[in-house]
Image (spheres, rainbow, N blue to C red):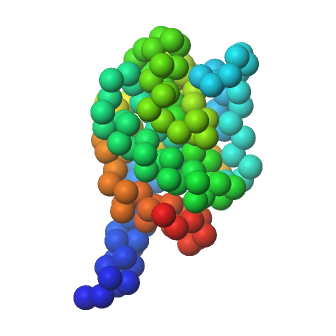
Amino acid sequence: MTLNNMVMIKGLIVLIFISAMSATFTVKSTPFTLKPLHTKEQTYHLKNNNLATISMIFQPNCSWCKKQGKTLATAIKHCQGLLNISLIGTNGNRRQLTHELKHYSSDIPAFIADRQFLRKIGGYQASPTTLIFNRKDKLLVKKRGFIPAEQLANVLDMLTQGKCQL
């Protein structure tokens, strides 16, 4: 089996996974308004501009979050303007979460989760939790745990119709 065939098969598996998950989640929670961690503004409205959105929920002292953040940093460089990528901090106060941002790319918008947002997404059990929203603001996938770069690359490729390659 060639490498190209393997990548196609992985892409199909991701597509099937996302399709199955979209039947499970019917939560509509973006565009969302949360307090930003990078700036002094009171609130920041993440405008999806008709783009898919990938958000990662992180918390202080989460080594897997930092690893996932490296993949997201690569994604934001290659996929800017093709989809929204953001970080959403929880289980810490503003100071702790802002301090934790030193481990992530400053190019990725970062927010602090509030109870309303967490309710809208059906809560979360562990960090990192990756949220994938389609262009119509529908939560397609809520994946707990680390997502390997190859799998995330397949998702990004699919969400951008092949325009974003890691």
| Quadrant hosting residue 15 | bottom left
**Image position, residue 10 (x, y; %):** 34, 71
**Image position, residue 134 (x, y; %):** 58, 53
Residue 85 visible in the snapshot: yes
The answer to whether 161 is drawn above or below residue 53 in the figure is: below
> Most extreme residue toward the bottom, as rendered?
1
Lateral position of residue 41 relative to residue 5, left or right: right
- Disc count in the image? 0
Q: Residue at x 53, y 13 (%)?
A: 94
The answer to whether 147 is drawn above or below residue 44 in the figure is: below
**Image position, residue 124 (x, y; %):** 38, 30
Q: Residue at x 57, y 45 (%)?
A: 85
The answer to whether 27 is drawn above or below residue 53 in the figure is: above
**Image position, residue 64 (x, y; %):** 31, 37
Lateral position of residue 55 relative to residue 24, left or right: right
Which residue is more in the foreground, 100 or 145?
100
Q: Residue at x 44, y 62 (%)?
A: 153
- Placement of the N terminus among the 4 image quadrants: bottom left
Q: Residue at x 60, y 58 (%)?
A: 79
Lateral position of residue 10 relative to residue 161, left or right: left
Residue 34 visible in the snapshot: no
> Most extreme residue toward the front, as rendered?
102
| Quadrant hosting residue 112 | top right
Which residue is more in the foreground, 98 or 44?
98
> Most extreme residue toward the left, as rendered?
1
